[in-house]
Image: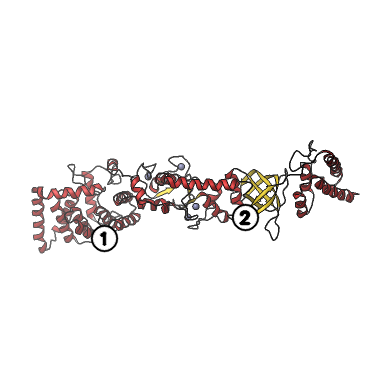
């Protein structure tokens, strides 16, 4: 399976960049695209923003690709840069390549060429000398030396090098051109010492033109090597001229004009179209993808470890700055600050968009190379989720206010620990958490009420507005902490069941207090902004928490939270009604 394949160029990924949609391409392939090749999502790059490489994938590729593939890719990049005359960038790539493979002649030839284009002639010459040492039979090496010397105005030395080149390959057209040009310029004022040399040169070139068989055999071998990597001189039947090296301004040396003239005659392709590799050459360059068994040997679990949780990635996501984390780990970091935990780049925009698609290629890679570890990692996650879903032994506790059964409780969530809690409530699917009041000495009250999330709206900065409604009351049995927030083991409260005479007595009390409420409602200022109280229920014991209107009344009255909490904790409806009766009497007295 071709794990590291770029979906755009179909080659092995090179300088991989992961987009916001989670798909990964070569950086170069994205330079000419404005949409993701797979999901068609638009590439969003704000003014001058650079595409940042996926650092994790880059290092994985570095480990997995063999030297041949790497050098091939560097050579290809280099040729492209030269063809668009981005020499400054090209020299960087060339140096990187040479550092990686110091004895790779085609790379050195390209570097020599780039130096020449940058008018760094002595660097170009030095490079050419290294090539001569590495491959004394390669005519290109002497040609490179010659052309550098020529630009340094060392015409005689240049001439010698061109002739050495021609001795090795009499069909090396550009060396012929160089020779002719130098001889033409020198002929009028030829120093006597040179006369012999020129003669010798001519006889030498004649000799080699006549008798080439002995020389050609090793040359063709050298030439194939250099073609392999898409470089420069071809010795073909059609005598295609190699790309001519021109100084960047193209005017300084007469020879170049001459060369261009000659080249135009020989080769109709316009200079910019002439590239060292054509489409057919690409076929030549077909990458071999690293085979899976090899990947298994090369990669270890520590290569796919999240730097935040130090575990194998779970749902890996890649930030715009190119760093990869488990989705939850990154979200938890951004609960505190919208910056990358590794490079500190601002991720406010990333947070604002709020979707973190998984880095697909990494997920595929882990699935292929570490299937059992992936299964284990998933199992751990599922176990954690199951534990967090247990709304008796592991209830997340929001410490804030007193909530009541059936009564809405809107919340503004901004603390990092509660952002995490809300996400987990959604992820586990429980959509529920306990609400308790702060109590000094024990972090939160002994009693509370479950809240169920009805609607949650994430704000661009990660805060959220949460609409909840109260469900059942509970008593705290044991307190704990989980990732910064409180949790508790609880038992749910149930009102004592009444029967017979006792039930009738409480029913009468209930009806009386409700009547009191209605009276209060119609007269007292405190209630004027409420439409109407909730209706009376037929069965006062239908819910384990008793009639809903009692809780509603408690929530709207301006009471001390500790007192509200006291009533919340009662499991006797009778007792609760007595308290409400007392409160309402006070209100009614105040009116009169
Ligand atoms: Zn690509
Ligand atoms: Zn995509
Ligand atoms: Zn992690
Ligand atoms: Zn980063």
- Which of the labelled discs sits on residue 264, or is there none? none
- Confirm whether residue 185 shows in the render: no
Task: Farthest residue to the front: give it.
Answer: 500
Give the camera-side residue of 557 and 458. 557
**Ligand 1 image-quadrant field:** top left
Left or right side of 111 for 551: right
Residue mark closest to the camera, 2 vs 1:
2
Residue depicted at x 74% and y 43%: 545
214 w.r.t. 196: above or below: above
440 to 273, vertically: above or below: below
Binning the other alpha carbons within 10 Å of mark 2 as few (below 14), some (14 to 19) or many (20 upward) gives some
Q: Position of residue 540 (x, y in %)?
A: 79, 39
Q: Could you tell me residue 434's position as x and y percent?
A: 66, 49
Where residue 449 appears, as percent x and y from the top left, is 70, 48
Number of numbered discs:
2
Camera-side residue: 373 or 35?
A: 373
Q: Residue 10 appears in which quarter of the rendering?
A: top left
Cβ–Cβ under 8 Å for marks 2 and 1: no
User: Which quarter shows the N terminus?
Assistant: top left
The x, y position of residue 572, in whole percent, is 78, 46
What mark, if any, has residue 121 been given in the picture? Answer: 1
Visible residue check, residue 86: yes
Q: Residue at x 57, y 56 (%)?
A: 336
Q: Secondary structure at mark 2?
A: strand
Q: Is residue 458 left or right of residue 410?
A: left
Q: Is mark 1 within 8 Å of ligand 1?
A: no
For the residue labelled by badge 1, is the local secondary structure a helix, a strand or a loop? helix
Residue at 35% of width from left, 48% of height from top?
295
Measured along the vertical axis of the image, is residue 136 above or below residue 392? below
Q: How is the image coloured?
A: secondary structure
Q: Which comes before the other along the chain, label 2 or label 1? A: 1
Q: Give the residue at mark 2.
A: 480
């Amino acid at each position: 399976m071709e794990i590291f394949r770029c979906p755009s160029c179909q080659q092995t990924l090179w300088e991989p960049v992961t987009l916001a949609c989670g798909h990964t391409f070569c950086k170069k392939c994205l330079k000419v695209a404005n949409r993701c090749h797979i999901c068609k999502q638009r590439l969003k790059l704000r003014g001058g923003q650079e595409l940042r490489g996926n650092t994790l994938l880059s290092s994985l590729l570095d480990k997995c690709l063999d030297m041949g593939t790497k050098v091939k890719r560097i050579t290809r990049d280099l040729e492209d840069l030269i063809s668009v005359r981005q020499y400054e960038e090209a020299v960087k790539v060339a140096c990187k390549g040479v550092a990686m493979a110091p004895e790779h002649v085609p790379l050195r030839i390209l570097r020599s060429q780039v130096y020449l284009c940058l008018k760094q002639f002595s660097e170009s010459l030095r490079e050419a000398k290294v090539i001569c040492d590495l491959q004394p039979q390669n005519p290109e090496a002497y040609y490179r030396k010659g052309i550098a010397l020529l630009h340094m105005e060392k015409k005689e030395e240049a001439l010698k090098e061109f002739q050495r080149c021609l001795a090795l390959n009499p069909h090396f057209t550009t060396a012929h051109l160089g020779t002719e040009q130098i001889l033409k310029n020198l002929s009028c004022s030829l120093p006597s010492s040179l006369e012999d040399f020129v003669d010798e040169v001519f006889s030498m070139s004649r000799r080699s033109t006549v008798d080439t068989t002995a020389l050609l055999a090793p040359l063709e071998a050298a030439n194939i090597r250099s073609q392999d990597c898409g470089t420069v001189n071809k010795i073909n039947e059609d005598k295609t001229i190699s790309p001519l090296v021109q100084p960047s301004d193209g005017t300084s040396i007469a020879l170049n004009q001459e060369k261009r003239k000659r080249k135009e005659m020989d080769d109709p392709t316009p200079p910019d179209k002439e590239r060292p590799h054509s489409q057919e050459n690409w076929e030549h360059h077909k990458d071999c993808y690293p085979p899976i068994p090899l990947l298994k040997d090369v990669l270890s679990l520590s290569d796919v470890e999240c730097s935040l949780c130090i575990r194998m990635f779970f749902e890996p996501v890649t930030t715009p700055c190119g760093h990869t984390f488990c989705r939850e780990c990154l979200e938890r970091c951004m609960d505190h600050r919208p910056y990358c935990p590794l490079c500190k780049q601002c991720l406010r925009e990333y947070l604002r968009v709020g979707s973190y698609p998984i880095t697909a290629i990494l997920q595929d890679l882990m699935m292929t190379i570490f299937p059992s570890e992936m299964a284990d990692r998933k199992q751990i996650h599922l176990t954690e989720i199951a534990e967090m879903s247990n709304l008796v032994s592991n209830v997340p506790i929001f410490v804030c206010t007193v909530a009541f059964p059936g009564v809405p409780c809107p919340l503004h969530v901004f603390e990092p620990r509660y952002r995490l809690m809300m996400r987990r409530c959604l992820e586990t699917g429980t959509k529920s958490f306990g609400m308790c009041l702060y109590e000094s000495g024990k972090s939160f009250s002994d009693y509370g009420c479950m809240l169920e999330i009805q609607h949650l709206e994430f704000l661009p900065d990660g805060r959220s507005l949460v609409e909840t409604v109260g469900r059942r009351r509970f008593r705290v049995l044991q307190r704990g902490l989980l990732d910064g927030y409180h949790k508790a083991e609880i038992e749910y409260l149930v009102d004592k069941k009444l029967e017979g005479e006792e039930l009738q007595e409480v029913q009468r009390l209930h009806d009386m207090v409700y009547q009191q409420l209605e009276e209060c409602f119609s007269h007292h200022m405190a209630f004027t902004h409420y439409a109407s109280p909730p209706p009376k229920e037929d069965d006062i014991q239908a819910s384990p928490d008793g009639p809903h209107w009692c809780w509603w009344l408690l929530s709207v009255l301006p009471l001390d939270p500790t007192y509200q909490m006291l009533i919340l904790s009662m499991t006797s409806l009778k007792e609760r009604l007595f308290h409400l009766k007392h409160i309402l009497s006070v209100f009614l007295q105040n009116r009169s």
